[in-house]
Amino acid sequence: MTPKLQIFISYAHADSIELVEKLRQDLEENLENLTPPLGYRVKFWQDTISIIGRKPVDSELEDAIKQSHYFMLFFSPGAQISRNCQIEWELALRYGKQIILIISKTPDQVITFEEFIQRVF
């Protein structure tokens, strides 16, 4: 059986869902076709496709973050003000996850990552 590597995707639905969907699909396609193969299967955990409803959403998100090897953070204006994103980030830090940072911005409302960290923590 091929080992699995899981990446949790954190983003704001308000301004990043299309970008996240496209990037996830592109990564899944390209990772499958690597030669030589990676030696493990990469699984992306994204709320719109991964939540299965057997337990409360908060518990399911926390379990997914705990089980993930990496935490992919789409840092956008919407994510900066999203309480759900902030909770996910706090959990990723609590569980010591390696963070893959993707900055998605528009000219208005943008603050630096450092400013955001100061506001949240």
Image (spheres, rainbow, N blue to C red):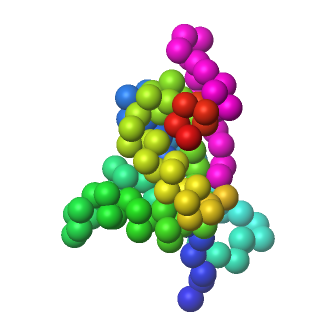
When the figure is inspected, residue 12 is found, relative to residue 78, above or below; the finding is below
Residue 62, how many percent across, how many down?
Answer: 41, 62
Which residue is rendered at x = 53% and y = 15% of the image? 109
Q: Which residues are magenta?
A: 99-115
Quarter of the image where the N terminus is located: bottom right
Residue 104, how many percent across, how many down?
Answer: 59, 29
Q: Is residue 24 left or right of residue 52?
A: right
When the figure is inspected, residue 42 is found, relative to residue 106, above or below; the finding is below
Image-quadrant location for residue 28: bottom right
Q: Is residue 30 magenta?
A: no
Q: Nearer the viewer, residue 54 or 88?
A: 88
Residue 3, how many percent across, how many down?
Answer: 60, 81
Q: Nearer the viewer, residue 76 or 24?
A: 76
When the figure is inspected, residue 13 is found, relative to residue 62, above or below; the finding is above
Which residue is rendered at x = 46% and y = 42% of the image? 86
Q: Nearer the viewer, residue 118 or 9?
A: 118
| Residue that protrudes farthest toward the right in the picture | 36
Residue 7, how many percent across, how many down?
Answer: 56, 60
Which residue is rendered at x = 52% and y = 48% of the image? 89
Q: Is residue 107 magenta?
A: yes
